[in-house]
Image (cartoon, rainbow, N blue to C red):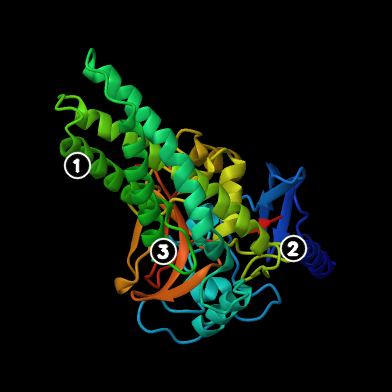
């Protein structure tokens, strides 16, 4: 009798322990882990339609591919080993809290050759010149000419107003405005042609701002000296103000035009599922931009890039929204050298599916948030590091 009771108790305990846990309300399950349901973010795509973006509410903890197969484990030249899910400092509790860290190839479940081939297939290059169509569109001489003409006219008018204010009662001749417009128009066109020719797959809005700013400021000071318009001590301040104003205006228009063209191309691109659950995908660089703009980031900020540009979306508190509403965490990352963990509770680096190769090697566009930065950093990441994944649905 006593033996029977013990057997029944053991069976009951087993049934209780083996019973599949119910998914908590407001959550979804993937590979035994429960994630908060995504919070939909509305985004006005500009065509009168509202697009909703959903971001999985925590860093992924996948220990297998969505099909249940083993993680991609192809060989890599140095850096982080493929096919392995890392927890920060190799502590499981950090995976529970911050999610897992993966090499880029493991995260996208493919080797670099396949990834680059997919990227090329998604690249809209109708004339087969190796340059993405949206860059061809904004590199068109007629587009550059119209843009530089309109912005140089506004800049010359602003210059004339400031110069007149500074040189009273010796008002400059009206011809000054025309001469300055011609000079500014020339250097804006030069700057755009120079910078847009530097990259085949993306527009470096940050560099456009820098080059236009420098060229316009120089041409104003040079022209003012050459034509003896003014030796006023305020000339440097005038040149700086006008140069900053026109650089921002041109960059903002380029950013908006580039995003409009990219949106057309994105419609025909294939999503990369990688390790994300069914129905979700690893976001492309463009997906990240759309999400950031849905959270309030201006287009000109979204198009900026570089590890030194740490204030993207700062005015609109985009990082705060990512953390408080969408579950982003400062889960740290792992560096390629000696597989060292760093920056836990200080920074997080998030993978995209947009990859490429340039003179520095294979790269992936990533996003970084850090407590020491006010904005979301967007840059090319070359190291074969252990990074975090976010999964999007749109």
Mark identifier at residue 173: none
Q: Residue at x 32, y 51 (%)?
A: 211
389 lies above or below 68? above
Q: Which of marks 2 and 3 is nearer the N terminus?
A: 2
Front disc: 2 or 3: 3
Query: How many numbered dots are placed on residues in this image?
Result: 3
What is the quadrant of residue 243 in the picture? Answer: top left
| Badge 3 element | strand
Residue 65 seen in the figure:
yes
Measure how far apart labels 2 and 3 are at the Cα level: 27 Å
Expressed as whole percent of the image width and height from the top left, the position of residue 362 reads: 42, 76
Residue 306 visible, this orientation: no
Front residue (pair 353, 158): 158
Report if the CB atoms under discs 2 and 3 are less than 8 Å apart.
no
Residue at screen point 78% across, 60% down:
16
Which residue does the image show at 47% across and 79% down from the upper left? 82
Mark carried by residue 222: 1
**20 or 84: which is nearer to us?**
84
Give the side of residue 50 with respect to residue 76, left or right: right
Residue in the image at 55% along x and 54% along y: 258
Residue located beneath label 3 in the image: 380
Residue that lies at the very extreme toward the bottom in this rendered image: 75
Residue carrying label 2: 279
């Amino acid at each position: 009798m006593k033996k029977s009771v013990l057997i029944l108790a053991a069976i009951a305990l087993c049934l209780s322990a083996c019973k599949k846990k119910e998914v908590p309300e407001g959550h979804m399950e993937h590979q035994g882990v429960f994630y908060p349901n995504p919070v939909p973010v509305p985004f006005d795509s500009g065509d009168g339609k509202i697009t909703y973006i959903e971001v999985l509410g925590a860093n992924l903890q996948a220990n297998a591919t969505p099909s249940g197969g083993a993680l991609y484990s192809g060989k890599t030249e140095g850096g982080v080993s493929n096919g392995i899910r890392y927890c920060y400092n190799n502590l499981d509790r950090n995976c529970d809290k911050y999610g897992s860290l993966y090499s880029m190839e493991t995260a996208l479940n493919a080797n670099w050759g396949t990834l680059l081939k997919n990227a090329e297939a998604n690249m809209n290059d109708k004339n087969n010149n190796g340059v993405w169509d949206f860059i061809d569109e904004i590199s068109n001489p007629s587009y550059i000419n119209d843009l530089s003409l309109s912005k140089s006219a506004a800049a010359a008018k602003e210059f004339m107003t400031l110069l007149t204010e500074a040189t009273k009662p010796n008002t400059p001749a009206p011809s000054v405005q025309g001469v300055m417009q011609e000079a500014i128009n020339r250097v804006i066109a030069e700057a755009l042609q120079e910078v847009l020719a530097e990259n085949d797959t993306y527009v470096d809005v940050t560099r456009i701002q820098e080059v236009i700013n420098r060229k316009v400021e120089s041409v104003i000071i040079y022209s003012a000296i050459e034509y003896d318009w003014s030796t006023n001590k305020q000339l440097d301040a005038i040149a700086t103000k006008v140069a900053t104003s026109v650089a921002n205006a041109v960059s903002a228009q380029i950013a908006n035009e580039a995003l409009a063209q990219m949106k057309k191309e994105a419609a025909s691109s294939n999503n990369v599922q990688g390790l994300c659950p069914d129905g979700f995908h690893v976001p492309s660089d463009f997906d990240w931009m759309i999400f950031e703009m849905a959270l309030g980031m201006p287009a000109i900020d979204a198009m900026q890039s570089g590890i030194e540009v740490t204030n993207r979306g700062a005015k609109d508190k985009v990082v705060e929204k990512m953390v408080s509403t969408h579950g982003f965490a400062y889960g740290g990352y792992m560096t390629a050298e000696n597989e060292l963990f760093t920056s836990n509770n200080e920074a997080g680096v998030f993978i995209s599916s947009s990859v490429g190769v340039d003179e520095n090697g294979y790269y992936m566009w990533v996003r970084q948030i850090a407590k020491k930065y006010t904005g979301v950093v967007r840059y090319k990441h070359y190291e074969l590091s252990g990074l975090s994944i976010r999964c999007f649905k749109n």
